[in-house]
Amino acid sequence: MRVKKSIDDLTIQDDYLFKKVMKNPEICSKMLERILHIKVGKITYHEEEKSLDMTLESKGVRLDVYVQDEGGTVFNIEMQTTNYRSELKLRGRYYQGMIDQDLMEKGLAESSKRIIGNMLKQQLDCSQIAILTGMPEKEVQAVVAELRTGKN
């Protein structure tokens, strides 16, 4: 059973307040910039509780806040209140795969190389890209090396 809180008792970790704050495109983009240390363009698309169900056999996901900036970069913003690091990495990879599949079906993304290439343009290093994409850092390093040598 959920305990009702007064508005004064809410924190950013509470689902209601988190989504209300993230609904403001200016606050949302500034928060992303501060956390990721990148420049985020104007938010052009925002959806809360975005559901991605690809096939009958796969487990669907519901994303807390899904936004896209004017440059086409997609951000999935999740508020995690548990400390299960190994589970979060796996969940992040699964969410990223579902987002990529959804984007590819819509024709908005060509491949992981394009996504990683865009992240490199934002001056992210391989470890940051690995965290954001959920890919193992060695895989990211291999794709980055391939992109830098021009072997596509």
Image (cartoon, helix red, strand yellow):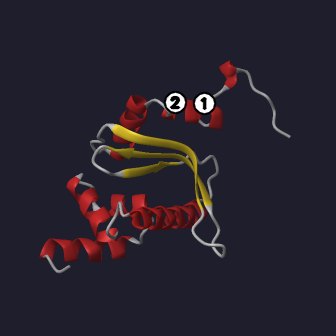
Q: Position of residue 90 (x, y in %)?
A: 55, 67
Residue 16 visible in the displayed image: yes
Residue position for label 2: 21
Q: Position of residue 141 (x, y in %)?
A: 28, 73
Residue 147 numbered mark, or none: none
Q: Quadrant of residue 13?
A: top right
Circle 2 Cα neighbour tier, 10 Å, few/some/many (<14 / 14–19 / ≥20):
few
Identify the amino acid type marked 1.
Answer: Leu
Quadrant of the drawing holding the N terminus? top right
Side of 105 relative to 142 (left or right): right
State whether residue 54 is above or below residue 36: below
Residue position for label 1: 17
Side of 66 relative to 72 (left or right): right
Q: Are marks 1 and 2 in contact (CB under 8 Å)?
A: yes
Q: Circle 2 sits in a helix, a strand or a loop, which is it?
A: helix
Side of 33 relative to 83 (left or right): left
Viewer-nearest residue: 12 or 58:
58
Count of picture labels: 2
Residue pictured at 42% horizontal, 50% vertical: 75
Q: CA distance from mark 1 to mark 2?
A: 6 Å
Q: Circle 1 sits in a helix, a strand or a loop, which is it?
A: helix
Q: Position of residue 11 (x, y in %)?
A: 61, 29
Q: Position of residue 34 (x, y in %)?
A: 36, 38
Quadrant of the drawing holding the C terminus? bottom left
Q: Residue furthest right?
A: 1
State whether residue 127 is above or below residue 35: below
Viewer-nearest residue: 113 or 79:
113
Viewer-nearest residue: 105 or 99:
105
Q: Residue furthest bottom?
A: 151
State whether residue 52 is above or below residue 59: above
